[in-house]
């Protein structure tokens, strides 16, 4: 990659994607499981890394969302390509390190893999064992897959295939996989400066009907219409809503986090979109200085986007 203005802008957007995702995670982590009215009543509008919450986070500490994204990014940067088996190995090692928090569906799937179940079979067994009537719709695969967008933003078919492949390590439900694809499609469009009508354009490309319908109807939604749970579709919807109803990276992430509920994942997803659109220069310096993995994410983003193909 040369260093002309276009490449520098792309590099800014790539760095922004990973770092703003982590910023959203760190901002929203202490607010997770709190209702938006509770947040407003007890804390006002949270605009900085305050730490605390049910995980007793330090200010600037990230949760499992960013930690899993880091493992995927490290694998891609090390190999120069996406390798689901190598990614799985890293995720299992991360799980074995006893992280402070881990999504239930992720834990069950990775535990089965650790105990010998082949990848892609484990997440299917989790659905069967847990008795989910519609399959687990957890949002734990959304941020995990974001580094793939930096690698394959030029190749839509490969992006779809590899995003679904990595998402299915832990999430067998097609809704979860296509939600991750929709997010990565939007990021890839934003990396190339294609902001106008990005949600509608991605809706036309996603064959999963629930996701496509959600994307087409989101501009009609108000804040009171949003579901702030950990459902993957609800998380993607509220994240896109926060991104689309603000005009700066900072405001988008703050709005997403202060909705409460599954605040860390939603704000992380919002951050990935906002970072891909606005770039790293739009991230507040006060966040960059306190975000624990900031420097590593800067390096990883550059390594991945420079090997994009």
Image (tube, rainbow, N blue to C red):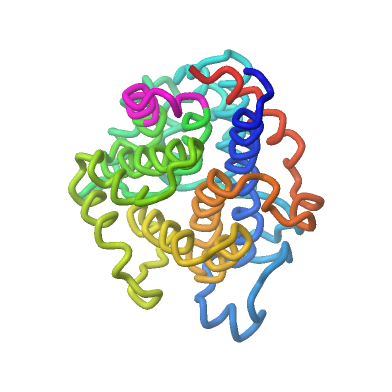
Question: Relative to 58, is 279 above or below?
Answer: above
On screen, residue 51 versus residue 240, left or right, reads: right
Question: Relative to 106, is 24 above or below?
Answer: below
Res 226 seen here? yes
Image location of residue 140, percent across then percent down:
45, 45
Res 128 seen here? no
Rendered residue at 66%/55% (across/down): 26
Image location of residue 39, percent across then percent down:
59, 78
Q: In which image quadrant can residue 215 be found?
A: bottom left
154 in the magenta segment: yes
142 in the magenta segment: no
Outermost top residue: 79
Q: Main secondary structure of the magenta part?
A: helix
On screen, residue 246 versus residue 250, left or right, reads: left
> Where are the magenta residues, as a range?
151-163
Outermost bottom residue: 41
Q: In which image quadrant can residue 95 be found?
A: top right
Rendered residue at 51%/16% (across/down): 81
Rendered residue at 65%/52% (across/down): 23
Image location of residue 301, percent across then percent down:
63, 31
On screen, residue 126 versus residue 291, left or right, reads: left
Q: Split into 4 quadrants, where in the image is the N terminus? A: top right
């Amino acid at each position: 990659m040369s260093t002309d203005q276009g490449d520098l802008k792309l590099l800014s957007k790539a760095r922004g994607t990973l770092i703003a995702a982590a910023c959203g995670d760190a901002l929203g982590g202490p607010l997770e499981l709190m209702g938006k009215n509770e947040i407003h009543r007890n804390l006002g509008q949270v605009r900085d890394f305050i730490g605390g919450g049910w995980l007793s986070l330090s200010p600037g500490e990230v949760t499992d969302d960013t930690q899993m994204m880091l493992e995927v990014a490290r694998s891609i940067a090390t190999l120069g390509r996406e390798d689901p088996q190598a990614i799985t190995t890293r995720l299992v090692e991360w799980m074995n390190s006893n992280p402070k928090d881990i999504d239930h569906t992720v834990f069950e799937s990775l535990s089965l893999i650790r105990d010998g179940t082949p990848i892609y079979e484990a997440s299917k067994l989790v659905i069967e064992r847990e008795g989910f009537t519609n399959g687990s719709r957890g949002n734990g695969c959304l941020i995990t897959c974001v580094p793939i967008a930096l690698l394959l933003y030029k190749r839509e078919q490969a992006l779809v295939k590899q995003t679904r492949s990595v998402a299915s390590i832990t999430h067998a439900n097609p809704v979860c996989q296509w939600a991750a694809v929709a997010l990565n499609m939007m990021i890839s469009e934003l990396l190339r400066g294609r902001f106008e009508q990005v949600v509608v354009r991605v809706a036309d490309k996603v064959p999963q009907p629930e996701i496509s319908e959600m994307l087409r109807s989101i501009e009609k939604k108000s804040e009171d219409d949003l579901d702030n749970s950990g459902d993957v579709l609800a998380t993607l919807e509220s994240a896109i809503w926060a991104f689309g109803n603000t005009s700066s990276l900072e405001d988008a992430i703050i709005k997403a986090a202060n909705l409460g509920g599954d605040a860390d994942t939603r704000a992380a997803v919002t951050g990935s979109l906002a970072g891909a659109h606005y770039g790293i220069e739009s991230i507040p310096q006060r966040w960059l200085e306190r975000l624990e993995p900031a420097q590593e994410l800067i390096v990883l983003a550059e390594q991945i986007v420079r090997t994009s193909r």
